[in-house]
Image (tube, rainbow, N blue to C red):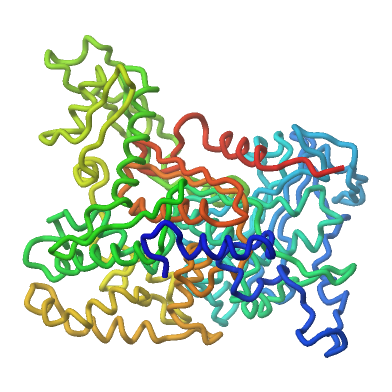
Amino acid sequence: MAGNGSVTRRRFLGIAAGATVAGLSACSALKRPAQGQGSSAPEGGAGSSEEPKIDLKEFAALELDMDAWSFDAQNGCWYQLGIPYCTKPATESYESLAIFVPGAYLTGEKHGRAYRCTVADDATVGSFTPATAPVVMPINSANFEAQACPTSYSYEGIGRYLAAGLVYVYAGFRGRSSTVESGSSEMIAGGAPWALVDLKAAVRYLRYNKDLLPCDTDQVYTFGYGGGGGVSACLGAMGDAPVFDDYLASIGAATHDGVEGAALSDALAGSASWSPLLSFDRADAAYEWMMGQFSDEGDRAEGTWTRLLSADLAAAYGKQLNDLALVDADGNPLSLDAAEDGSYVSGTYYDYIIKLVEDSATAFLSQTSFPYTYTPPLGGTPTFPGDPNLTAANEAAEGTAAETASTDVDAAGADADGEAVVAAPTVVGVTQVQSTVFDSIESYVGTLNGDARWLTYNSRQQMADVTDLWSFVAACRPATRGVGAYDSYDRSTVVNQLFGIGDESTLHFDATMAELVAGQRNRYREATGWQEIYVSDWGGDLVKKDSFGIDMATRTQMSDPLAYLSDHYESCGTSKVAPHWRINTGLFSSETPLVSEVNLALALAAYDGVGDVALNCVWGASGGLAEQAGNATDNLISWVTSCVKPKDK
């Protein structure tokens, strides 16, 4: 492993391989090429063996029916729903997709209830043509739930994407749990890595039909929030990773085109995410390092075994972080230093996190006009358009009849000491929120500081200073998840479900926690709440394999983008990594440990072939589609548009 010297293993390999292996990452230089990255001819010279014959009609059933288009004349949208994207789907409800196309891109002739369409080659929408239009794919799965293909059409929300010239593809996929489809008694596999498998198959479907579709299928961008953001990140990092081959073959995902037999790739052009949930082999430790270790409430109360576990996990994260050998933009190693008590609460990595927080605070305080009104976001999870059934369900759950407003309080409304004033809410419907009005920067900063002066702001220099990361955490993102934030001791989290197998719907998966409960049981049993069964629970679950014989360690790595970006993992270099990345996270969120998103951005920035990585840490945002300014949809569309470069003529 690379240490803390000025030349990491990644840098050394990159220098050594740069002259001969153009386009491959440093860590891939010593690994076998991923599918589509190298020659398929066997070693041993010409004539050593014959290449297997390819059946050009093997996936003919997946050819897009150009006679089956529907047209929304009022809004100018062509669409098809319920298109199977693999030849042996385990579930047609989920393993199918819908395509939405700008009206100008196709010319249609009506026959019966449908249209027979051809591509209008000379059309232009926004800055794109049918030959250059990128594809965007939403992932509506905040908690790793399944996403069904829409069964009915709605233009609501899609228009902004189509108006910009993008093609919108809404693909179904399986969720975190196995299930039995309606009308059947057969168990349909769910959990990791099936969502990735299904979406990879959907991308391959698009490329199988590249000569029919009015878009550039090389330019596919996924986006999601929470769990969906994690899936988007995995898709971006794991293009053509061979570990998925058997899974893809089992559902009949296309492997080659029907013209020349050329291999089909599932690699992306770009991945966008908001507060992504990912890297579950480190996530529990990361949560304790970032937020849990300084809490003394709930699971972390004095005298409990879970408080001891919290401290041990936080220390384990320090070692895990150092193993990743991350570097900053200048190539300087980022690491954590071990203190005498075994904790890791200082080092260049700690300083880097502090700087991110400071920069975000500076951007917010220098760009915000005071008096400033803060309104907490309404509950619920973001929903991307495409499926009117999902939209209707979310609206019913969140009570869309409710609209909220706050009574404006101007500067005179603050008290004599300039403290924040809470405005009485004006409520319509069933939802109620309270808005807090801050008279000045001083009152805002003073409220955050409380009794500890950890944040200061120099108005003349327009610069914030954060003196203590842990005070920031206590004030702005305290731990709200228990110890074992993702792999709970009672297997009760959605991520425990994600790693279930068949009818064992929820399983342990965190090897670090398994090692700790086994190795530290003598300490833990002296505290309250400990049960000896925890040792066998974790140990027994981690040796279980899925129907393909894949063990739990491999499945967790198949849900961790860094397993394909960091030299610490053998799988590094076995995939094609997307060149364009956008990662947004709310700094006041307690759902993710922040460092997971930061580590992803750092690993991507150091990876050969990645063109750009935008990490946006949004001050004051606690969840949802956090943006520093503007609208999330408009910002996403602008980002995709900026990533697509015109092809050479």
- The quarter of the picture where residue 540 lies is bottom left
Say whether residue 321 is left or right of residue 453.
right
Q: Where's residue 29, x and y in %?
A: 61, 69
At 37% across and 35% down in the image, what residue appears? Answer: 360
| In-front residue for pair 2/35 | 2
| In-front residue for pair 337/55 | 337
Q: Is residue 230 above or below residue 122?
A: below
Q: Residue furthest top?
A: 412
Q: Where's residue 316, x and y in %?
A: 27, 67
Q: Residue furthest bottom?
A: 48
At 69% across and 72% down in the image, what residue appears? Answer: 35
| In-front residue for pair 211/106 | 211
The quadrant the C terminus occupies is top right
Say whether residue 333 is left or right of residue 441.
right
Say whether residue 138 is left or right of residue 629.
right
Q: Is residue 433 above or below residue 10?
A: above
| In-front residue for pair 491/478 | 478
Q: Is residue 580 above or below residue 440?
A: below
Q: Where's residue 384, x and y in %?
A: 56, 46
Q: Is residue 199 visible?
A: no
- The quarter of the picture where residue 320 lies is bottom left
The quadrant the N terminus occupies is bottom left
Q: Is residue 303 visible?
A: yes
Say whether residue 87 is left or right of residue 408.
right
At 33% across and 52% down in the image, what residue appears? Answer: 349
Q: Where's residue 594, x and y in %?
A: 36, 50
